Amino acid sequence: MKLERILVATNGKDADVEAVKLACDLAKKPKAKVHVVYVIEVKRSLPLDAVIEPEIEKAEKVLTRAEEIAADRDCEVETDLIQAREVGPAIVDEAMERGVDLIVMGLTYKKRFGSFDLGRVIPYVLEAAPCRVMLCREPMS
Amino acid sequence: MRNNWHPKLGDRFVRRPRLRIFHLRRSLGIPALYAAGYGDVGSSIYYALGIVAVVALGATPVALAIAGIAFVFVALTYAEGSAMFPEAGGSASFAHHAFNDLVSFISGWALILTYIATIAISAYTIPPYLGHFWPILKESPMAGTTLSMGIVLFLMLINVIGIRQSSIINVSAAVIDLSVQILIVVLGALLVFNLSTLQTHIVLYWPSWENLFIGIALAAVAYTGVETISQMAEETRQPTRRVPFAHIMTAVTVLVIFAGIATVGLSTMSPTELATEWAHDPVAGIAHNLSGAIAPHEMAARWFSAVEPQIIFTWILTTVRELLPVLVGLLAASILLVATNAGLIGISRVTYFLGRRGLVPGVLASVHPRFRTPWVAIILFSVISIVLLIPGFFAPQAFLHLGALYAFGAAMTYFLAHASILKLRDKHPELPRPFKIAANLKIGGRELPLTSMLGMLVTAFVWLVLLITQTYSRWVGLGWMVLGLGIYFLFRWRKKAYSNKIAGTPTDFTESQR
């Protein structure tokens, strides 16, 4: 499997940690580049470049944490903060623009109305991404 | 703002903004832009035809045509401006680059007025169209206006919460709207269009010169929504190419469809009928009369001699006859609901633009910490729209007043948009213009677009006509602008006073050492 670029999509949940770790481990041998992105979803009542301070602060914390994790694994990452109307298309588009070979996403174990729920973003990325997609589901406990 | 700085391992203290603008790839190409633009502009025919007919009577198609030409000028101006500055803010953004903060504020504040009027008028027109199913909504101003207010309240809530809005729904609504309007035009052309009847209606009911001018001014309400495409420029891929194209496509479609509907309107009923019984739901009136003109058996027998095609065609025509008024009633209400919502979204974006540039108090642009929406602007301007609807309970002219108020604000906004393009051609001819208006006059060594100059004249004329003849829009419109300027100057004065106070206080180490 050719691995030159890996994209990790984070969303501030605990599963991000596992996703970043996994991406760094996968990138080590082929010396692949790891990009970590956080997508802020902007509602339509705001312009796309609206400055939403609480969200930006949260995103900065998440990306900083990702950098720390990568540093612990001797992995250099490039982080990016994106604002978009919808997260799923933003991740797919980022992957296409950067020409990544793999998208890694963390998945929180969550049930909704009694059934395991993948949410809205992951099914979209699984369906639309042109490259491989790896999900890292956090443990049940 | 792309940041090329990469953090070194262990370097955690310096953080530069990582913000990168993202253009939504899939849904904002030309079709989505066109759908958004037409969905907004195309919805206004559902009330504009009635508003103009009340004043212009037989000259309604003429008034709409003249306003349509002015609309083309506006579309071209916006096409050039949006291609140069693909950002939210529309005419306020153009004015910001061409002139100064004050002019930008005036343009933005007038734009807010047009959005408020659009919200009120779109919501006000929904109950009459639903009157096909529940007649009380059309017959009772109390019931209709109450529902209108409820609609604005409902949309205010969902926009404050920020319920995700599917772009597929908006595109579908625009496509269905356009399809129904084309169907009306085609049916009208086939079934009822009669040139001599049309001529009779126009000539016999030709208004006075004053009413004609007022009708032309009010016809500006038919072209609400030209700002919508500009507002979406910043989230469009290749905006310099796609936004102007979407503007032009929308303008052409609107002109053709509106001309068709206006012609069909005056072919199916007299101007007085349009201006009275169907003033609030003119397209429903057209559908009603078109249905009445369909005689399935006679038409089928006339067009086909064989029995089988006659049976099929009779069935088709009977279905169309029964369904058309229902379809128009439902679709008009849906489209107007989408347009009301678009007005709310537009108003919040413009307010955010003005707030970001320090032209209005920041509280107006503040974002709700949980819902991440500009809740203050949404609530405030929704309440103002609801207040504007109050006369609907008791004043039969409320409809007209709202239209005049829209036209008042729109004339100011468009005037400043034209002026901004001319100023930019003069002040910054070197700026890249991915879309440049073709028809230019060379004046003083500068290429100035003819359409913008004519547009300025027309919008100035419209504004003056409204100022002189329409008492309601004169006082409410001027009052609104005076209020806005008061807020602007007070806010700027307090900001400057605060800045001066801070500047006099040592804040950094080197300063405090002196």
Image (cartoon, coloured by chain):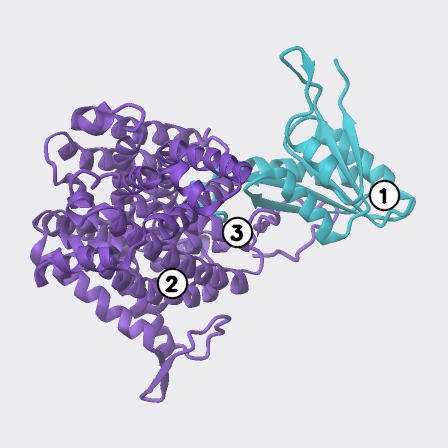
Residue at the disc numbered 3: B235
Amino acid at dot 3: Glu
What secondary structure is marked by label 1?
helix
Residue type (three-letter) at the residue carrying disc 2: Ala
Identify the chain of the residue marked 2, using the numbered disc in the image. B
Query: Where A7 sits versus B504, above or below?
Result: above
- Camera-nearest residue between B177 and B298: B298
Could you tell me which chain the residue with mark 1 belongs to?
A
**Mark 2 surroundings within 10 Å by alpha-carbon count, few (fewer than 14), some (14 through 19), many (20 or more):** many
Position of residue B3 in the picture relative to residue A125 (left or right)? left
Residue B401 lies left or right of residue A14; in this view the side is: left
Question: Going 22% across and 37% down the picture, which residue do you hit?
Answer: B384
Q: Quadrant of residue B366?
A: top left
Q: Position of residue B288 (x, y in %)?
A: 30, 37
Query: Observer-nearest residue: B500 or B232?
Result: B232
Q: Marks 2 and 1, how far apart in space?
A: 51 Å
Q: CB under 8 Å between callouts 3 and 2? A: no
Label 1 neighbour load within 10 Å: few <14, some 14-19, many 20+? some
